[in-house]
Image (cartoon, grey):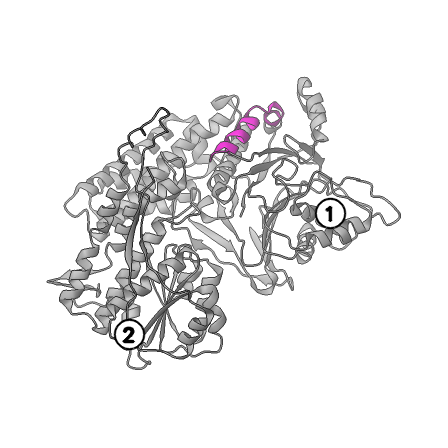
C-alpha cells in the first residue's frame, strides 16, 4: 500500500472572513445546558464547518486577536459543556453520551485543527506572521497536504515526496528572483523531479507556473520523520518563498511509499515526471516529443504490464527511461507524454484516459500538469485501490483514505469502481467547469458519483503519547468493547431484551431488521447461519460461530464459519432463502467479504453485518448491521487488536439476540451468560496495565530487563482445517448438528 494526498486551490484565499456566524454559535452555546439545546448550537458549527476550516478564517485568526479570542472562547465553552455532561447523573444515557461525543469532536477540531494549525503553518514560513498573504496561503496549503500525508504514513513510509506548483498571473523568469538566488535556481532546473528540483513554464496566456519538488527516502524511520524532513527543506528554501510572494494560485500532489516495484531510493520516490534518458529520442523510429516532460504522477498499486509497455511503447519508439529509476510508476507520465507526441488525444483529460486504458493492474493515480494549473487528473482501476475527494471552500482535497480528509471536510466522494474498467476523473477550479467530472475507463461514458458523510474526526486517529499505533490501539481496546456493548440491549427485570423501541413505539434499534426477518411467517425460517470474514475478521468469525452454537444449542439450525475467499467460490447458483450470513469487516471495504455478500444476497440470504465504518460498502450491501464500537473507531496498525475484540463482543450480542428471538435460551440463562460478559472492558483494561520490571537475572552478566505489558487476551481453540468442500456442504445441505467445539482462553504476556 501507498498513500496519495493532494490539493487544488481556488481563489478563496483572497477573500476576507465573515465570522458573524461564529458569534451566533458562541451565543447559542453560552445559553445551552441541556443536550437538546447543545445539539442545536453545535448544528451551527456543523453547518459552517467548511467556513471554520477555510483559509480566510485561518488568516483572520493570525491577523486579528479578536478572532483568535472568539475561537478560543467557543472551544472553552465546548469543553465546559462536555465536562458538565460527563459528570452529570445522566452521563451514561445514550442520548447524553452522543451529545458529549459531539462536544469532544468539536473541542478537538477548534483547538487542534483551527487554533493549533496557526502555529504549524507559521512554522513553515521563514518570516512567520510577517509573511505576505500569498506566502501564507502557499504555506497553509502545503501544510494541509503534508498533514494529510502524515496521516497516510501507516500505508507505507519508506519514502515520501511532494510537488508544490505555484501559478503567477504574469510572465515570470529567474531574472525576477533576487540576484543571490538566480544561479542556484538555474542549477535546480536540471534536477527535474529529484529532491529540490525546480520546473518553470510560461503558459500561452502569459501566466507562469513554478513547481518545487521535495523528497526523502529512508529504510528505517519513525512515524513523522519524513514529514518533518520535508517541512524543514521547504522552510529553508529561499527560492520557494521568493516565488510565493507572487502566487496567484497553487496546487500540490504528494505521496508516501511502500516500495513494491523498484528500490527504496530518491530516484524512485514519487511524484515522478516524464523526462527520458534521451530527450531527443534515438534512431529512425524516434518519436518527436512535446513539452509535457514535467507532468508529475504519483501511483498507489502496481502496473502489471509495465515491462511490456516499457519495451513496446517506450523503448520500441526509440526512447529510454533513466537507468536509476526502476519503479513501474515512471511509465505513466512517459506514456501520457507520448500520447500527445503521437497525436493520440486532444486535451489532457483525453490523453490521461487513453493512458489509463493501456495499464493493467489495480491502481490509483494522480497527475499534475504544469500547463494546466486549474486541473488535476485522477485515475482508478481494479478493486484494491481507491481515492477520496472533498470539495471545500478553498478548492478540492484528495486522499487515499477518508482519515486524510477528516480534519477539513465532512463529506467526500469515493472513487472506487471495478465495473467498466474503473474511473478517469478531472478535478477543476476553472470558472464554468464542474469541480469533478468522471468517466468510465472502458467506454469514456460520463459517470455519476455521490458524496458520503465522513463520520470520523482527526482525533479518532491521533496517536497521542504512543510511539506506535499498535500500542495505542491495544490500550483503546477496553473503551472500544464498552462502546460496542453500550445501548445495544436493555435489562428488564431478570432478562436481557433486544427490543430497544420506546414504550408503545416501533423498534428502530440495530436489531429491529434482524428480529423482523426471524419472525417473518412469509419467508422460510432460518435454518443456516454462516459467519464469514477475511483476515483477522475470519478469526473473529470462528469465535462468533462458537458463541452462536452455544446460544442455539439443540436448535434446528446449522452454524458454520468460513473465509470469505473460500465461501464465495461455492455460493454461485445456490439458493440461500433460509440462510443468515453474518459478514464481519473492520473497514467494510474488504473485497473478498463484499463479493461473498453480493453472491449470498443474490441467492436470497439475509445479510447481517458486523462492521466498524459507517457509510462503508458493506453497510450499504447489508440488510441489518451492528457497528463495533461507535462505528468510527479507526484501526491504523496492521495487526488487529481493538477491532478483533469488538467484533467478538458484537458476536456475543448477536448470539444472545438470536437466542432471544428463537427462544433457545430461558431468560434466566440468557441473563446469566450476559452478566459474565459485562465486566470484559474493565477486566481487559487491567490486562493492559504496566507491570513491575522483572528482577535482574543472576550471574556476572545481568541481562537487560524490560517493563512488561499484557498484550493480548484472545479466544483460541483447536479445530480441523476447514476445506472448500465443507463450505460447499453448508451451502447445499444443512445439518441439525450444533455440538459446540472446545474453547480455551489464552492470556499472553512477554517472556521474562
Whole-percent x, y for residue 12 in the image: 51, 39
Outermost residue toward the left in this view:
493
**Placement of 113 over or under 102, stated as above or below:** above
Query: Mark 2 or mark 1, which is nearer to you?
Result: 2
Residue designated by label 2: 518
**Placement of 85 over or under 522, stated as above or below:** above
Q: Is residue 59 visible?
A: yes
- Label 2: few (<14), some (14–19) or many (≥20) C-alpha neighbours in 10 Å: some
Whole-percent x, y for residue 407 in the image: 42, 42
What's drawn in magenta, residue-wise?
221-242
Residue 84, disc: none
- Identify the image quadrant of residue 178: top right
Disc with the residue nearer the chain's start (2 vs 1): 1
The C terminus lies in quadrant: top left
Whole-percent x, y for residue 77 in the image: 26, 36
Give 59 or 114, whichever is nearer the viewer: 114
* SS assignment at label 2: helix
Q: Magenta: predominant secondary structure element?
A: helix
- Decide whether residue 222 is among the magenta residues: yes
Q: Is 649 positioned to the left or the right of 194 in the image?
A: left
Give 461 or 638, whichever is nearer the viewer: 638
Residue 337, disc: 1
Amino acid at each position: 500500500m501507498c498513500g496519495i494526498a493532494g490539493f487544488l486551490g481556488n481563489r478563496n484565499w483572497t477573500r476576507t472572513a465573515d465570522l458573524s456566524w461564529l458569534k451566533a454559535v458562541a451565543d447559542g452555546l453560552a445559553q445551552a445546558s441541556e443536550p437538546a439545546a447543545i445539539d442545536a448550537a453545535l448544528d451551527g458549527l456543523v453547518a459552517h464547518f467548511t467556513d471554520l476550516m477555510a483559509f480566510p478564517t485561518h488568516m483572520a485568526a493570525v491577523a486579528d486577536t479578536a478572532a483568535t479570542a472568539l475561537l478560543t472562547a467557543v472551544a472553552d465553552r465546548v469543553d465546559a459543556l462536555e465536562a458538565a455532561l460527563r459528570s452529570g447523573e445522566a452521563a451514561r444515557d445514550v442520548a447524553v453520551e452522543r451529545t458529549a461525543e459531539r462536544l469532544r469532536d468539536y473541542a478537538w477540531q477548534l483547538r487542534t485543527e483551527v487554533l493549533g494549525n496557526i502555529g504549524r503553518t507559521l512554522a513553515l514560513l521563514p518570516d512567520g506572521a510577517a509573511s505576505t498573504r500569498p506566502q501564507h496561503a502557499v504555506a497553509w496549503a502545503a501544510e494541509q497536504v503534508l498533514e494529510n500525508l502524515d496521516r497516510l504514513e501507516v500505508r507505507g513510509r519508506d519514502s515520501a515526496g511532494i510537488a508544490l506548483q505555484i501559478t503567477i498571473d504574469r510572465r515570470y523568469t529567474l531574472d525576477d528572483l533576487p540576484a543571490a538566488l538566480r544561479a542556484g535556481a538555474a542549477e535546480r532546473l536540471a534536477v527535474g523531479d529529484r529532491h529540490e528540483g525546480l520546473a518553470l513554464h510560461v503558459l500561452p496566456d502569459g501566466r507562469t507556473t513554478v513547481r518545487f519538488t521535495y523528497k526523502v527516502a529512508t529504510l528505517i524511520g519513525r512515524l513523522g520523520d519524513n514529514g518533518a524532513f520535508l517541512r524543514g527543506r521547504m522552510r529553508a528554501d529561499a527560492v520557494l518563498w521568493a516565488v510565493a510572494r507572487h502566487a496567484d494560485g497553487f496546487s500540490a500532489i504528494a505521496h508516501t511509499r511502500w516500495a513494491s516495484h523498484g528500490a527504496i531510493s530518491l530516484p524512485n520516490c514519487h511524484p515522478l515526471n516524464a523526462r527520458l534518458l534521451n530527450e531527443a529520442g534515438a534512431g529512425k523510429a524516434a518519436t518527436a516529443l512535446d513539452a509535457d516532460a514535467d507532468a508529475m504522477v504519483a501511483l498507489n498499486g502496481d502496473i502489471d504490464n509495465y515491462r511490456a509497455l516499457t519495451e513496446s511503447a517506450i523503448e520500441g519508439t526509440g526512447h529510454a527511461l533513466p537507468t536509476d529509476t526502476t519503479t513501474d510508476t515512471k511509465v505513466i507520465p512517459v506514456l501520457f507524454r507520448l500520447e500527445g507526441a503521437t497525436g493520440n488525444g486532444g486535451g489532457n483529460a483525453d490523453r490521461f484516459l487513453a493512458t489509463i486504458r493501456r495499464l493493467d493492474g489495480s491502481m490509483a493515480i494522480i497527475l499534475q500538469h504544469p500547463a494546466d494549473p486549474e486541473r488535476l487528473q485522477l485515475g482508478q482501476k481494479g478493486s484494491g485501490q481507491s481515492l477520496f475527494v472533498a470539495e471545500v471552500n478553498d478548492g478540492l482535497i484528495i486522499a487515499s483514505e477518508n482519515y486524510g480528509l477528516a480534519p477539513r471536510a465532512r463529506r467526500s466522494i469515493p472513487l472506487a469502481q471495478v465495473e467498466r474498467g474503473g474511473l478517469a476523473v478531472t478535478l477543476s477550479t476553472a470558472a464554468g467547469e464542474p469541480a469533478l467530472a468522471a468517466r468510465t475507463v472502458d467506454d469514456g461514458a460520463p459517470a455519476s458519483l455521490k458524496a458520503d458523510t465522513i463520520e470520523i474526526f482527526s482525533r479518532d486517529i491521533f496517536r497521542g503519547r504512543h510511539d506506535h499505533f499498535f500500542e495505542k490501539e491495544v490500550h483503546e481496546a477496553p473503551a472500544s468493547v464498552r462502546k460496542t456493548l453500550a445501548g445495544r440491549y436493555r435489562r428488564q427485570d431478570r432478562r436481557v431484551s433486544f427490543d430497544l423501541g420506546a414504550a408503545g413505539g416501533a423498534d428502530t434499534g440495530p436489531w429491529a431488521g434482524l428480529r423482523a426477518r426471524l419472525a417473518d411467517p412469509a419467508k422460510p425460517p432460518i435454518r443456516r447461519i454462516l459467519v464469514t470474514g477475511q483476515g483477522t475478521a475470519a478469526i473473529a468469525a470462528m469465535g462468533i460461530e462458537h458463541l452462536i452454537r452455544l446460544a442455539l444449542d439443540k436448535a434446528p439450525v446449522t452454524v458454520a464459519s468460513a473465509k470469505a475467499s473460500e465461501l464465495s467460490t461455492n455460493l454461485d447458483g445456490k439458493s440461500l432463502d433460509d440462510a443468515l450470513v453474518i459478514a464481519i469487516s473492520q473497514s467494510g471495504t474488504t473485497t473478498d467479504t463484499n463479493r461473498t455478500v453480493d453472491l449470498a444476497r443474490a441467492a436470497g440470504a439475509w445479510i447481517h453485518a458486523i462492521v466498524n465504518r459507517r457509510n462503508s460498502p458493506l453497510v450499504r450491501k447489508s440488510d441489518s448491521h451492528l457497528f463495533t464500537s461507535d462505528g468510527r473507531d479507526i484501526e491504523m496498525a496492521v495487526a488487529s487488536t481493538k477491532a478483533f475484540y469488538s467484533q467478538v463482543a458484537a458476536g456475543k450480542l448477536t448470539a444472545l439476540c438470536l437466542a432471544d428471538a428463537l427462544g433457545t435460551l430461558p431468560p434466566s440463562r440468557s441473563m446469566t451468560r450476559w452478566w459474565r460478559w459485562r465486566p470484559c472492558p474493565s477486566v481487559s483494561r487491567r490486562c493492559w496495565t504496566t507491570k513491575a520490571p522483572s528482577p535482574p537475572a543472576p550471574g556476572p552478566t545481568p541481562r537487560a530487563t524490560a517493563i512488561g505489558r499484557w498484550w493480548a487476551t484472545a479466544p483460541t481453540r483447536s479445530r480441523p482445517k476447514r476445506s472448500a468442500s465443507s463450505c460447499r456442504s453448508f451451502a447445499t445441505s444443512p445439518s441439525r448438528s450444533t455440538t459446540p467445539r472446545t474453547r480455551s482462553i489464552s492470556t499472553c504476556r512477554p517472556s521474562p
